[in-house]
Amino acid sequence: MNPGLGTQLAHLLDLLDSAVQDSYVQAQLATRPRYTPVLRALSECEPSTLGQIAQSANISQPSATQTVALMIEDGLIS
């Protein structure tokens, strides 16, 4: 049985994120593909809560929480 379209798209996104991350490492950039929606949200309206970040970035609140925690750990935001 062939995987469904959703499964195929999820796999494609995993491959793309991995390739983008590899290029960031090669360019010695301290960022990750998953940071992009949060960085855009912060640059557009300076949301003050994780819920506002999630809404502005169009991601789930748990994803926003995890991403912001990683960004803090990497020293990108405080």
Image (cartoon, helix red, strand yellow):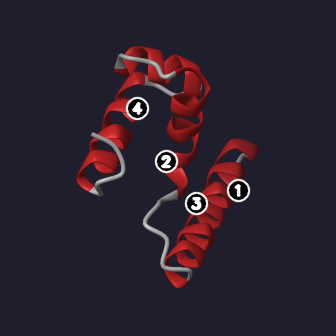
Query: The disc labelled 3 sits on which kind of residue?
Result: Asp
Among the two numbered marks 3 and 4 on one chain, the one whose residue lies closer to the N terminus: 3
Amino acid on which the number 1 mark rests in the picture: Met
If you read the primary sequence from the N terminus, does the residue marked by circle 4 or circle 1 appear first?
1
Q: Earlier in the sequence, mark 2 or mark 1?
A: 1
Residue carrying label 3: 14
Q: Position of residue 70 (x, y in %)?
A: 30, 49
| Residue 29 image position (x, y, % from top left) | 49, 71
Q: Which residue is mark 2?
A: 35
Quarter-of-image position of residue 27: bottom right
Spatial CA distance of label 2 from label 1 is 35 Å
Earlier along the polypeptide chain: callout 3 or callout 1? 1
Look at 50% across and 36% down and name the residue there. 38
Q: Nearer the viewer, mark 3 or mark 1?
A: 3
> Does residue 76 sit above or below 50 in this rendering?
below
Numbered label attached to residue 64: 4
Residue for badge 1: 1
Q: Residues within 10 Å of mark 2 (few under 14, many from 20)?
A: some
Assess whether mark 1 and mark 2 are in contact (beta carbons under 8 angstroms). no
Give the number of the mark in front: 2 or 3.
Answer: 2
Note whether 57 is above or below 4 in the view shown: above
Q: Nearer the viewer, mark 3 or mark 4?
A: 4
Tell me if residue 63 comes above or below residue 45 in the rendering. Answer: below
* Alpha carbon distance from label 2 to label 3: 15 Å
User: Marks 2/4: CA distance?
Assistant: 9 Å
Relative to 3, 33 lies left or right: left
Judged from the image, the secondary structure of the residue bearing numbered disc 1 is: loop
Going from N to C along the chain, the mark reached first, 2 or 3, is 3
Element at label 3: helix
